[in-house]
Image (cartoon, rainbow, N blue to C red):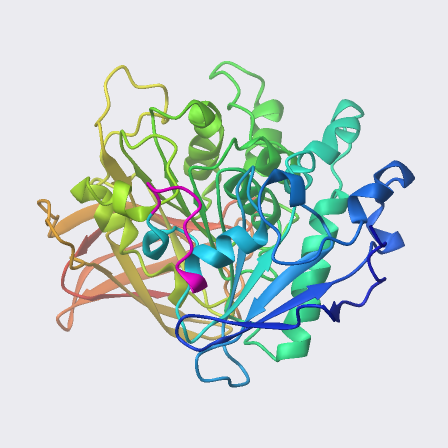
């Protein structure tokens, strides 16, 4: 095989364009490794040119990707980045979404969890089972206690930057998603890059170790009697201190999936470190298609969560200890839990004011339209932490006053102190299906 062309990417001279079922243009690009990524000389063979359309393990590679244009091409369109699962390729997932292509008879291409709207650009990236989107490349650094982006992550981020610039995408609406191995990559690559991604969705992620490594440690919290310094250090790592505010994370996992055994680290860190997590779970196992998850009505509510509407240039609230959450199988190792459930999937918000001295956000409980609606809450309480603030700056240790206005009257008010990490959390705030306006000064 011929060696792939060097960076920057070039259109595949042998297969420059394909066409989606709905007429959208698909372009295949190839490239070689950049020296800055740090791929070892021993990996040179992994960059051999593979003619498209590639499929299956034998044709996995690092050197090709596909860009799908919006149905009506335009500048400033959003971008959805897709990371494929183990044993598959970028073309396999492109085939699901754009060509109606099945590899096995049981598959449901229209319901694959990585499909994006037809007014988006879509970027289908490539990896190998051996690379695991960069997670396996961290092994040596982990043994040395070094947290640094692996070659796979650097390649993915450079490719996203190149595509975003070439196609002039909306920089405030770049999203990342993946299934299984791609879900592991989505968490590991997405969480530390809140400066790029507005939101990410990990579907049955094959472990959360990559995310823990890149976030500086999502290990189980210290024991209650541990020294305060140890607990403070853990909390700082768990909240992502020193990193940009993370993208909003949507995670679908199953207690019947062997890959979910590391979910407690992520869920506990989200609760304790005030990370933005929307979670759906049920006995659906390790699945690729939303039609299997939607069989459980509460999971269908989580599937309706509008993650592709979140913007990077707007603040968001983090919800923790919500009274409308089901009992999670991975939170504090409960002896009993709900067979299917959600965390934070009912909550919605809209920014109203983000000024240097005042902040206002609308908050409410949504009842999304689903096929078989479960009983949905009309009211709930939750701790609300403000993140990704644009102009309203939080000073650690300072006290801030707040009030909740609903139907033109103040229904709750108080003051609270910002934590050491610069996070402001309003405890036990009441929410309802009627829109409330949270004001902070």
Q: Nearer the viewer, residue 206 or 238?
A: 206
Above/below status of 436 relative to 266:
below
* Location of the C terminus (image quadrant): bottom left
**Quarter holding residue 367:** bottom left
> Within the magenta stretch, is there residue 99?
yes
The main secondary structure of the magenta stretch is loop
Q: Residue at x 89, y 53 (%)?
A: 35
Above/below status of 427 relative to 64:
above
- Total marks in image: 0
Above/below status of 65 relative to 170:
above
Q: Is residue 107 left or right of residue 126?
A: left
Q: Position of residue 254 (x, y in %)?
A: 34, 31
Q: Position of residue 343 (x, y in %)?
A: 30, 41
The stretch in magenta equals: 98-107
Q: Is residue 29 left or right of residue 342?
A: right
Above/below status of 164 relative to 266:
below
Q: Position of residue 374 (x, y in %)?
A: 10, 45
Q: Nearer the viewer, residue 131 or 10?
A: 10
């Amino acid at each position: 095989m011929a060696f792939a062309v060097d960076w920057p990417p070039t259109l595949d001279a042998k297969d420059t364009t394909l066409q989606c079922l709905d007429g959208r243009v698909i372009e295949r690009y190839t490239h070689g490794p950049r020296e800055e990524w740090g791929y070892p000389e021993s990996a040179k063979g992994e960059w051999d040119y593979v003619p498209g359309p590639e499929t299956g393990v034998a044709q996995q590679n690092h050197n090709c990707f596909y860009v799908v244009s919006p149905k009506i091409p335009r500048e400033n369109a959003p971008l959805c980045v897709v990371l494929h699962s183990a044993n598959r390729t970028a073309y396999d997932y492109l085939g699901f979404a754009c060509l109606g292509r099945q590899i096995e008879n049981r598959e449901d291409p229209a319901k694959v969890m990585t499909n994006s709207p037809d007014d988006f650009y879509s970027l289908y990236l490539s990896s190998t089972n051996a690379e695991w989107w960069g997670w396996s490349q961290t092994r040596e650094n982990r043994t040395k206690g070094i947290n640094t982006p692996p070659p796979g992550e650097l390649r993915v981020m450079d490719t996203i930057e190149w595509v975003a610039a070439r196609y002039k995408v909306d920089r405030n609406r770049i999203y990342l998603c993946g299934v299984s191995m791609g879900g592991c990559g989505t968490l590991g690559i997405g969480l530390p890059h809140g400066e790029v991604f507005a939101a990410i969705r990990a579907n049955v992620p094959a472990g959360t170790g990559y995310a823990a490594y890149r976030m500086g440690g999502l290990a189980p919290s210290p024991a209650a009697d541990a020294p305060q310094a140890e607990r403070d250090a853990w909390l700082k790592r768990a909240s992502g201190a020193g990193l940009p505010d993370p993208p909003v994370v949507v995670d679908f996992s199953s207690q019947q999936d062997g890959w979910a055994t590391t979910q407690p680290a992520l869920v506990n860190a989200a609760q304790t470190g005030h990370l933005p997590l929307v979670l759906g779970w049920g006995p659906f196992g390790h699945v690729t298609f939303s039609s299997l998850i939607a069989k459980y009505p509460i999971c269908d509510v989580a599937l309706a969560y509008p993650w592709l509407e979140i913007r990077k240039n707007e603040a968001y609230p983090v919800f923790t200890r919500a009274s409308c959450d089901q009992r999670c199988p991975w939170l504090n190792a409960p002896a009993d839990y709900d067979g299917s459930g959600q965390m934070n999937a009912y909550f919605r918000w809209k920014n109203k004011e983000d000024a240097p001295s005042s902040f206002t956000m609308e908050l409410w409980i949504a009842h999304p339209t689903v096929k078989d609606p479960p009983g949905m809450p009309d009211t709930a309480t939750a701790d609300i932490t403000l993140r990704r603030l644009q102009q309203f700056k939080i000073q650690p240790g300072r006290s801030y006053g707040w009030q909740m206005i609903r139907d033109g009257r103040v229904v709750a008010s108080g003051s609270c102190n910002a934590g050491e990490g610069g996070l402001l959390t309003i405890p036990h705030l009441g929410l309802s299906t009627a829109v409330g306006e949270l004001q902070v000064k």
